[in-house]
Amino acid sequence: MGDEKRIVSRIQQEIEDANELLYYIQDLYQTINYEPYKEMLTSSLMQIFFAPVVVQSLTVFKIKPKLGIQICLYVLTMTLQVIRCPLL
């Protein structure tokens, strides 16, 4: 039972860290007033994280996904709820 509690605790910490990162990204979008920088940030997020990790995990089934479907859906849902940028 101790291992199970540690695993649950670790997962909860990872979720909290991920949510904190999303709020940090939202803060960046709010403080950036120069539209080309917002576009660069969005492009970087799409090219570095969303396309190769989240989208690929949801769409490519020939190789082992990097993330499970539930995690991908959670990340996408939280991203769309937290980050208020029309570019996303």
Image (cartoon, rainbow, N blue to C red):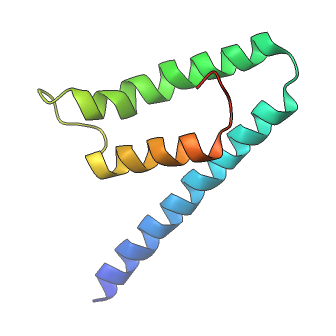
Q: Residue at x 55, y 52 (%)?
A: 18
Q: Is there any visible trace of residue 79 in the rendered image?
A: yes
Q: Nearer the viewer, residue 66 or 57?
A: 57
Which residue is nearer to you in this view: 77 or 48? 77
Q: Which residue is more in the foreground, 21 or 73?
A: 73
Q: Is residue 6 above or below residue 78?
A: below
Query: Position of 57 compared to 20: left or right?
Result: left
Can residue 68 be seen at all in this image of the molecule? no
> Which percent across, then down, holds residue 83?
65, 39
Question: Of all residues shown, which one is farthest toward the left?
Answer: 62
Residue displayed at 50% across by 60% down: 15
- Give above or below for 62 relative to 65: above
Q: Position of residue 69 (x, y in %)?
A: 27, 46
Point 77% across, 10% down: residue:
36
Q: Quadrant of residue 62?
A: top left
Q: Residue furthest bottom?
A: 1
Count of labels shown? 0
- Vertical arrangement, residue 32 with respect to residue 72, above or below: above
Instruction: Report x, y in % for residue 54.
Output: 38, 34
Q: In the displayed orientation, state which residue is furthest to the top.
A: 36
72 on left or right of 79: left
Residue 82 shown left or right of residue 49 in the figure: right
Task: Look at the picture and state if 84 lies above or below 21.
Answer: above
Classify residue 1 by image quadrant.
Answer: bottom left
Image x and y of residue 88, in percent: 58, 26
Q: Which of the 4 image quarters holds residue 55?
A: top left
